[in-house]
Image (cartoon, grey):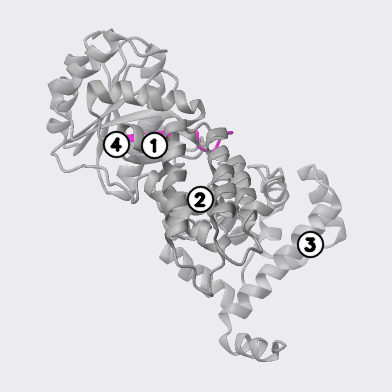
Amino acid sequence: MFDSLSDKLDRAFKVLKGQGQVTEINVAETIKEIRRALLDADVSYKVAKKFTDTVKEKALGENVINAVSPNQLMVKITHDELAKLMGGGASEINITGNPAVILISGLQGSGKTTFSGKLALHLKTKKGKNPLLVAGDVYRPAAIDQLHVLGEQVGVEVWSDKENKNPVDIAKKAVAEAKAKGHNVVIIDTAGRLAVDEQMMTEIAEVKSAVSPQETLFVVDSMTGQDAVNTAKAFNDRLDFDGVVLTKLDGDTRGGAALSIKNIVDKPIKFIGTGEKMEALDVFHPERMADRILGMGDVVSLVERAQEQYDEEAARKLQKKISQNKFDFNDFMDQIAQIKKMGNVKDLMGMIPGVGKAMKNMDVDDDAFKGIEAIIQSMTPEERAQPKILNGSRRKRLAKGSGTSIQDVNKLIKQFDQTSKMMRMMGDKKKMAKMMQNMPKR
């Protein structure tokens, strides 16, 4: 995400590289490049100009100390202003009602139904809630069917009434159903249109009035750029929603919506969709997004994703196996499964400072582990549990069975051996200390 914007901002800052001090001339040149980068990212001219005027004012107003170069100073100011432009800090969703009612709005095709399923999973697994999904789109039977499929996928009950064509009545009955069955959150997926129209606005306004939701969220496809911002304004003028959800941020998006929308509607971005998997939903942190835009990575989010997949009991068992030198290919597969749950590989590596830029032109397949998994799945239970028995003939069989080459099999076994040794060493504090002592001193 934001690869093009990141590259152009990086080029803008290079104007100041090697410069001994901040001057009006070198700042003006950098500001011009930053503004151009923002406009190319589909940020409105008004927002881009206001942003760059603020950056320029702060850059020229700073007393540059010897420890900070003009380039570093400009990056810091731009980072802070980008975070402020996108909202400053994360904004929590309000789920205090009993039940808390969350109304989902947006145009058709923006990803409302998918987001509803993702939000249900998020609230169930991370907030300990018992949500009820409500199919409130009376015009598209496919949307109702889709919500039922998603509900089954995430283990959340779905309430629908295909014969009822009154969205207000559906919403009110769903809330009553939630109260009767002990659901403490109700997520109402509403109908969308291909464009903003009076019928649509009247209908959703009536639903909002009938159920008095704690949260009204506007879902927008971030790939539509500035059009998304204009649509958000139209919805907000009529609905006065509480927050924005940006979907498809993992796609080829220029970032204009994420950078402009808070400034235009004065409502926070609360969630971002970062992939097709139901787990691919993140709380939006403006300062972390600014880090990523400027190529600084996002270690905090990476650690949080890892912690979400962390099973303390499983980790203890794994540690015991490692200490006894019993780490095998079954454990190796478990580790791969945990990494895959965290998100697509390129997105994860982009969270590591410096790695994102290095990988920008690399084609990292989301199925990066496919070949490894195929080889391990071709092994017998005995081979998985006892990797040392994998001799030449067995390796040939694995290559044939997995549709890979003998070189791929040998490479995997070598990687497995190296991983096993490293894990044993990390578990042995004495060996680790000795290795550190033997490292060359600088």
Q: Residue at the spot x=67%, y=86% of the render?
A: 435
339 or 45, nearer to the observer: 45
- Viewer-nearest of labels 3 and 1? 1
The image quadrant where one finds the N terminus is: top right
Residues at marks 3 and 1, CA–CA distance in whole angstroms: 42 Å
Amino acid of disc 3: Leu
Q: Residue at the spot x=46%, y=64% of the render?
A: 314
Tell me which numbered mark, 3 or 1, is placed earlier along the sequence: 1
- Viewer-nearest of labels 4 and 3? 4
Residues at marks 1 and 4, CA–CA distance in whole angstroms: 25 Å
Residues at marks 2 and 4, CA–CA distance in whole angstroms: 31 Å
Task: Give SS at disc 4.
Answer: loop
Amino acid of disc 4: Asp
242 or 133, nearer to the observer: 242
Please tell me how many numbered marks the rendered image carries: 4
Q: Residue at the spot x=57%, y=58% of the render?
A: 352
Check disc 4 and report the residue beneath it: 266
Give the side of residue 42 with respect to residue 95, left or right.
Answer: right
Amino acid of disc 2: Met
Task: Give SS at disc 3.
Answer: loop
Residue 228 position by quadrant: top left
Tell me which numbered mark, 1 or 4, is placed earlier along the sequence: 1
**Stretch of the chain drawn in magenta:** 243-253
Q: Residue furthest front?
A: 24
